[in-house]
Structures are given as structure tokens and as C-alpha cells.
Image (cartoon, grey):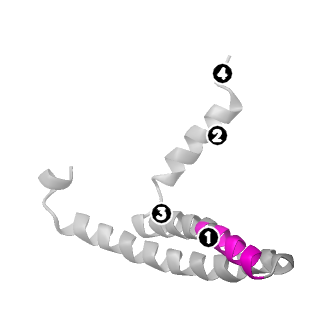
Amino acid sequence: MGEPSTKKSLRVFLTLKHIEPPPVRWANTWSGSRRVVGAIVGLIIGLFVYAPTAPFAMVEIGIPAAMVGGVLGLLIGSLEMGVVEFLPSDICG
């Protein structure tokens, strides 16, 4: 018997995740997390301002938050790549 397909696909996903260069990995992580936070904030604001338009507030705040998160993640990933490039190998591993 082999391992369950869910476990195998998770293992493949985690392996592929580390193949991505750091800027792409950080941009994806930050963009996704900021999109969720932006959507939740948009929902709360929308419910307090005018409840029937709350889903539109989620989009109006979530999309720009995702863009800002993606740019910040790209910058942080680029800095990580630059720091690892210039540090001696005995410090970084």
C-alpha cells in the first residue's frame, strides 16, 4: 500500500514550495495573508457603514491590501535573497 493521496499531494506541494525563489514565495505568502485581513476589515467596515454593500467593501479593501502585501513580500524576499548571497556560508548554513 502506498501513502494516502492527501498526504502525498501535501508532501509534493511542500517540496515545490521550497523550489520557488524567495521573492516569489514571500510575495505569495504576504499577498494571500493581506488579502484575507483586508477582506475581514472590509466586511466589518461595510457592516457598520451600510450592511447591504458589505461584500463590495470586502473587495474594495481586500484587493488593494493584497497588492500592497504582494509588493512588500517581493521586497522582503529580495532582501532575503540579497542577504543570503552576501553573508558567509558558515553563518547562513
Counting residues from the N terminus, which is met first, the one under dot 2 or under dot 4? 4
Distance Cα–Cα, label 3 vs label 1: 16 Å
Residue 20 is situated, as x and y percent measured from the top left of the image, at 47, 60
Counting residues from the N terminus, which is met first, the one under dot 3 or under dot 1? 3
Distance Cα–Cα, label 4 vs label 3: 30 Å
Residue 51 is situated, as x and y percent measured from the top left of the image, at 82, 76
Distance Cα–Cα, label 2 vs label 4: 12 Å
Is 38 left or right of 86, judged from the image as shown? right
Tag 3 residue = 25
Tag 4 residue = 2
Residue at x 53% of width, y 51% of height:
16
Tag 2 residue = 9
Residues drawn in magenta: 37-49
Q: Nearer the viewer, residue 73 or 37?
A: 37
Q: Which of the image's four quarters has the N terminus?
A: top right
Residue 45 part of the magenta segment: yes
> Disc number at residue 35?
1
Distance Cα–Cα, label 2 vs label 3: 19 Å
